[in-house]
Amino acid sequence: MRFLYFLFASIAVISVRDIGDDTLFATPYLGWIVDIVGNIIMFVAVWLLYRLDIRSLPKLSQVTVRINWKIFLYPPAIFSLLYAIFTIEETQTSDQLDDMLVFVIYIFSTLLVYLFIWVYHVIAENISALNENKILSIEVMKALAQTIDAKDEYTRGHSARVADYSRMLAEKIGLPLEDCENVYYMGLLHDIGKIGVPNEIINSTSKLTAEEYEVVKTHPAVGYDILAQIKSRPDLSIGARWHHERYDGKGYPDKKAGKNIPLLARIIAVADSYDAMTSNRSYRDLLPQKVVRSEIEKNAGTQFDPDIAACMISIIDEDKEYQLHE
């Protein structure tokens, strides 16, 4: 009903404008300047209607969407400009525009902008829902990572740090934003397969036996099987399965080598080893920064991709105060 009232108000505005045509158009361009101002006021009124009508619908009231009011300057500006040009051309041959034509221009412009606002709201609502789902997914992944890390008191926060270091490396290499985000998610879940490793092995303070080590080596495959069930994000399983592969092909579980190891898995492998060396363990304290740097440099080309190792060394050199550790 409010919108119908607004249409009737538009007709009234047009009528009032017609009354003043003789005086308004007596001064050059004053008439169409008034038209532009009038149109802007009308579109502001449409915005108010949007706030009162569309936002009050039960289906949409549960979603909060911030809309930049500046977008509503463009439609009135475009319509007013076209209207002004058309008015100037017509007034050269006639005293005033046909009343019906003026009515159609105003009503069509109003309806179109009202539709524009509605479409924008629907798009904004969908974007908001996608953002909420993305935030929820990240929170769930972080919760899973914390659950896995909690199995070992010495690895609390390990997955989150590996995720952070992996993203830093991806950014340093110059990968696209999407890959930087993906490697972060993979880093969060790279050790999820440890859920299948008995606690007594994970928390062992003595050197693992050959049999125990073989059990530990199963966690990449277990993690892969778990994450492969997420059909919408099959890439998440990449980091879980191949973060223990070596550049020289002597890693596990598949003994992949060189560029046959997925790039993001090679990144996580470096980040994982870096955090292991810069964290306290049951059998040692975190290593000095110089030792960590030396180990990464020494194993470049054998354990690590040499290019990624070089990027890690660059990050270490930039960390003058040795802030990147547990």
Image (cartoon, helix red, strand yellow):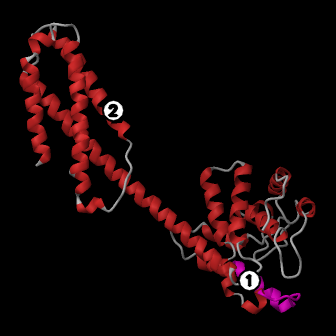
Answer whether residue 233 is visible to the viewer in this image.
no
Name the residue rendered at 22%, 50% in the picture.
Answer: 52
Q: Which disc, if any, is residue 73?
A: 2
Q: Position of residue 184 (x, y in %)?
A: 65, 62
Decide whether residue 211 is among the magenta residues: yes
Asked if residue 142 lies left or right of residue 308, the reply is: left
Asked if residue 163 lies left or right of residue 245, the reply is: left
* Above or below 288: residue 311: above
The mark nearer the N terminus, 1 or 2, is 2
Asked if residue 271 lies left or right of residue 179, the reply is: right
* Above or below 218: residue 238: above
Name the residue rendered at 12%, 25% in the picture.
Answer: 102
Name the residue rendered at 37%, 46% in the picture.
Answer: 67
Q: What's under tag 1, amino acid-wise?
A: Asp
- Residue corresponding to mark 1: 152
Q: Which residues are magenta?
A: 203-220
